[in-house]
Image (cartoon, rainbow, N blue to C red):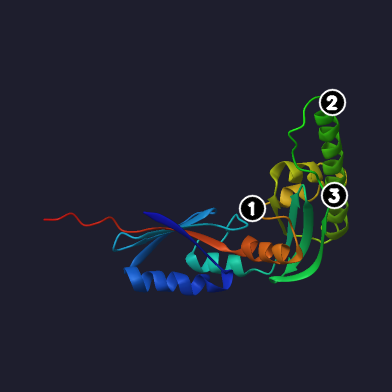
């Protein structure tokens, strides 16, 4: 059975040591995109390298990589709200969140439904335009190393189509964050989630009865 755990980058070194303590002598296979730890009891831990590629292909290299001091941008966009933040050393140093009212669906038919749909589309465009201006103001001049996005993928794509944000697109890295309508607390938690190290742990196979 495989399960996923997420830990802060500051805990990775201790977690790797603890894995060996719990499961026995461990060997490592490290590539620019993944570390695989195989313990003598058959346990397996796989870590996709955050913000890769990894240059120093060792466990210590991965620890140093996740602890590197980066300027991390977070862009969250949904129909009902948006948020942009800049994190340095895990601390939020600049941010802006906002909301726009976008009507939900309706059961009305005929011309009423069409008018309603047009109004809703206009509201969504206004919300995405507001999100774009915030991204231009907060993220574009921030000299980011990495950008993590979340919310609604179509909304994010719409915002990043703006030519003023073209330099941000190559900086995008996973994960894509699923979030509620962005408020300040949501944005702050997104910064934590963006930096988290995700580990897939596979338990050893059950021993067969003699």
Counting from the top left corner in percent of width and height, residue 151 is at 70, 50
Q: Earlier in the sequence, mark 3 or mark 2?
A: 2
Q: Nearer the viewer, mark 3 or mark 1?
A: 1
Q: Is residue 18 left or right of residue 101?
A: left
Q: Residue under circle 1?
A: 178
Q: Secondary structure at mark 1?
A: loop
Q: Which residue is mark 2?
A: 111
Taking 68 as reference, is 14 left or right? Answer: left
Q: Earlier in the sequence, mark 2 or mark 1?
A: 2
Looking at the image, tell me whether mark 3 or mark 1 is earlier in sequence order: 3
Return the residue at label 3. 132
Q: Is residue 109 visible?
A: yes
- The one of 108 and 168 positioned closer to us in this rendering: 108
Rounded to the nearest angstrom, the CA distance separating label 3 from label 1 is: 19 Å
Question: What is the C-alpha distance between the residues marked 2 and 1?
Answer: 35 Å
Left or right position of 104 against 8? right
- Res 17 → quadrant: bottom left
Residue at 70 percent across and 46 percent down: it is 152
Q: Which of the two marks, 2 or 1, is nearer to us in this view?
A: 2
Q: Nearer the viewer, residue 81 or 197?
A: 81
Name the quarter where the N terminus is drawn.
bottom left
CA separation in Å, label 3 and label 2: 31 Å
At which x and y percent is residue 21?
36, 74
Label 2 environment density (alpha carbons within 10 Å; few <14, some 14–19, many ≥20): few
Q: Which mark is residue 160?
A: none
Splitting the image into 4 quarters, where does residue 181 fall?
Answer: bottom right
Q: Residue furthest left?
A: 210
Give the camera-side residue of 100 and 32: 100
């Amino acid at each position: 059975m495989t399960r996923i755990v997420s830990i802060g980058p500051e805990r990775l070194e201790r977690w790797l040591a603890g894995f060996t303590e719990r499961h026995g002598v461990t060997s490592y296979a490290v590539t620019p995109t993944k570390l695989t730890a195989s313990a003598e009891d058959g346990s397996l831990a796989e870590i996709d390298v955050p913000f890769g590629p990894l240059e120093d292909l060792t466990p210590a290299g991965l620890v140093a990589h996740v602890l590197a001091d980066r300027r991390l941008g977070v862009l969250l966009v949904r129909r009902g709200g948006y948020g942009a933040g800049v994190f340095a050393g895990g601390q939020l140093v600049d941010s802006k969140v906002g909301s726009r009212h976008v009507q939900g669906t309706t059961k009305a038919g005929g011309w009423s439904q069409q008018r309603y749909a047009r109004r809703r589309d206009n509201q969504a465009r206004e919300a995405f335009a507001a999100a774009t201006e915030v991204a231009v103001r907060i993220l574009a001049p921030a000299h980011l190393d990495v950008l993590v996005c979340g919310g609604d993928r179509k909304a994010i794509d719409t915002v990043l189509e703006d030519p003023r944000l073209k330099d941000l697109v190559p900086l995008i890295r996973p994960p894509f964050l699923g979030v509620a309508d962005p408020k300040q607390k949501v944005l702050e938690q997104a910064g934590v989630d963006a930096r988290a190290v995700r580990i897939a742990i596979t338990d050893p196979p059950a021993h067969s009865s003699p």
